[in-house]
Image: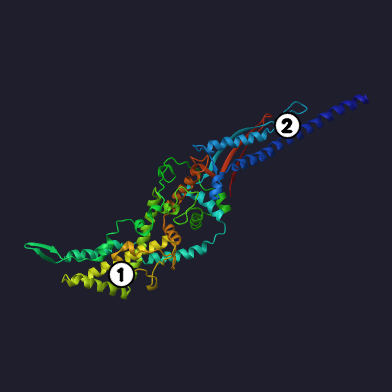
């Protein structure tokens, strides 16, 4: 009896012990499944980010994943497939059987891998792109830039250089001359002709339609003639891919996008006249961002036209305040109008001479800037370069000069960029990036709107032991 009693007791004890052991084993399995899920999710999502675009990093120091993977059709579904593939491989790195014939103690398989949220470079008018640029530029001295730019912007806008219609101002005096009219003399019986005024201002004004570059460059044929099809780039492309915008985690980690830092970045990564970059398709990239034309020539022409306008307004304001120069113009006008015997013509003729002189001085300023020299926003007598007789021979009177004081060409471009609409500036900057990346092997159809730098994944795994788990994680370059 005693032996049987012990056997029954032992049997009951073993049942309880085995139940406890199997429960512990199953609990360990559940914990291991969850832990492996966490580890594989981390590996998989980081593996997706490891596929960042190499050329974008090399040329622009930006970390983005191209959802086309060097193809022609960017789609987040491609990334979802990559993520699922990475995780599945990590669940089954090798097919090994245990002593009991079971391949895997956890027997996990990848279920679904969805990416419901992702931040595309062009989202929020390029805010995602600019956030990463702000992060890349780090502790850039924005305050020093702002102080330098804002002072010149205040000077420029205070003088009305970007708003004064100097052409209409000049035409008022030309209209006065036409209204007074020129006297006529009889050259033959019954035939009369106007007494010529021979105003040299007319010679200078005749060059206004010649194109600025043709007037200020020694060799206009050396200007780049590259032409692009703008319809193929992001600022003009109608079928943009879009994501869910700038994520809060990225802003918290790297801060808000900074427009001044973005502008500084553009001058670090983009070329302009006199500082072209080998990698670039359009050689005058800053000029393209400012003008948006499809050829280098037109972009440079538009920028120099605006420079000429600024300089002409500035020079007109100065020359009208310079009594010595006004006296020279008055003496020339008096000599010209003496033969007409119409003293009323002298005043408007004087002003047309002054405006023509300021115009020639402005052409000289633009030539100096394109030659690498400096020109102040507002001049003094010491800064004036041309004489009154230059209006009789505009092309012949312009000379290259790499000296002077004031701002150089790059700094004038910075002022223009600062005054430009931020949305337009960003869209054209993204055009430039696409142009340059497409020149590299395997990236002929590269699109920035197909690139993301942060994403949220909703993951699901199953186990052949009857378990399934879901997880949502956010990863990105921040």
Inter-mark Cα distance, 2 to 1: 95 Å
Q: Mark 2 = which residue?
A: 105
Camera-nearest residue between 178 and 108: 178
Question: In this picture, is 466 found above or below 271?
Answer: above
Q: Mark 1 = which residue?
A: 388
Asked whether the viewer can see residue 161, the reply is no
Residue 410 position within the rendered picture, expressed as x and y whole percent measured from the top left: 45, 60
Camera-nearest residue between 171 and 133: 171
Question: In this picture, is 370 found above or below 90?
Answer: below
Q: Is residue 438 left or right of residue 26?
A: left
- Looking at the rendering, which quadrant does residue 27 occupy? top right
* Mark 2 crowd level (few <14, some 14–19, many ≥20, 10 Å Cα): some
Residue 469 position within the rendered picture, expressed as x and y whole percent measured from the top left: 64, 35
- Looking at the rendering, which quadrant does residue 456 occupy? top right
- Looking at the rendering, which quadrant does residue 13 occupy? top right
- Secondary structure under the numbered disc 2 in the rendered image: loop
């Amino acid at each position: 009896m005693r032996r049987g009693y012990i056997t029954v007791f032992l049997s009951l004890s073993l049942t309880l012990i085995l139940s406890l052991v199997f429960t512990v084993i199953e609990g360990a399995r559940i914990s291991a499944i969850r832990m492996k899920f966490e580890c594989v999710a981390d590996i998989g999502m980081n593996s997706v980010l490891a596929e960042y675009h190499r050329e974008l990093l090399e040329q622009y120091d930006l970390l983005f994943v191209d959802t086309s993977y060097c193809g022609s059709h960017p789609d987040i579904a491609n990334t979802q497939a990559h993520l699922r593939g990475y995780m599945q491989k990590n669940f089954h790195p090798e097919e090994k059987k245990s002593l009991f014939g079971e391949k895997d103690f956890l027997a996990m398989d990848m279920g679904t891998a969805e990416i419901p949220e992702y931040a595309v470079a062009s989202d929020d008018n390029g805010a995602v792109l600019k956030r990463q640029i702000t992060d890349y530029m780090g502790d850039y001295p924005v305050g020093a830039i702002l102080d330098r730019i804002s002072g010149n912007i205040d000077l420029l806008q205070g003088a009305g250089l970007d708003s004064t219609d100097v052409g209409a101002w000049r035409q008022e005096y030309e209209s006065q001359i036409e209204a007074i009219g020129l006297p006529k003399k009889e050259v033959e019986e019954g035939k009369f002709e106007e007494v010529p005024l021979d105003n040299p201002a007319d010679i200078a004004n005749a060059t206004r339609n010649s194109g600025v570059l043709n007037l200020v460059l020694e060799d206009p044929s050396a200007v780049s003639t590259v032409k692009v099809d703008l319809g193929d780039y992001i600022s003009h492309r109608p079928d943009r891919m879009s994501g869910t915008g700038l994520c809060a985690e990225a802003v918290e980690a790297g801060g808000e996008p900074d427009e001044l830092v973005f502008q500084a970045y553009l001058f670090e990564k983009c070329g302009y006249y006199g500082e072209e970059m080998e990698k670039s398709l359009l050689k005058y990239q800053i000029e393209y961002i400012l003008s948006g034309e499809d050829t280098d020539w037109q972009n440079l022409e538009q920028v120099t036209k605006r420079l000429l306008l600024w300089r002409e307004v500035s020079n007109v304001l100065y020359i009208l305040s310079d009594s010595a120069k006004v006296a020279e113009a008055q003496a020339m006008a008096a000599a010209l109008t003496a033969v007409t015997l119409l003293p009323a013509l002298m005043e408007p003729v004087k002003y047309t001479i002054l405006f023509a002189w300021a115009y020639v001085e402005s052409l000289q300023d633009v030539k100096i800037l394109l030659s690498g020299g400096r020109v102040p926003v507002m001049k003094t007598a010491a800064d004036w370069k041309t004489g009154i007789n230059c209006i009789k021979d505009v092309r012949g009177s312009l000379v290259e000069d790499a000296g002077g004081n004031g701002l150089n060409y790059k700094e004038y471009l910075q002022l223009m960029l600062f005054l430009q609409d931020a949305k337009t500036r960003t869209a054209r900057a993204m055009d430039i990036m696409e142009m340059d990346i497409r020149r590299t092997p395997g990236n002929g159809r590269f699109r920035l709107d197909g690139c993301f730098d942060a994403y949220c994944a909703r993951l699901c795994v199953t186990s052949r032991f009857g378990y399934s788990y879901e997880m949502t994680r956010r990863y990105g370059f921040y």
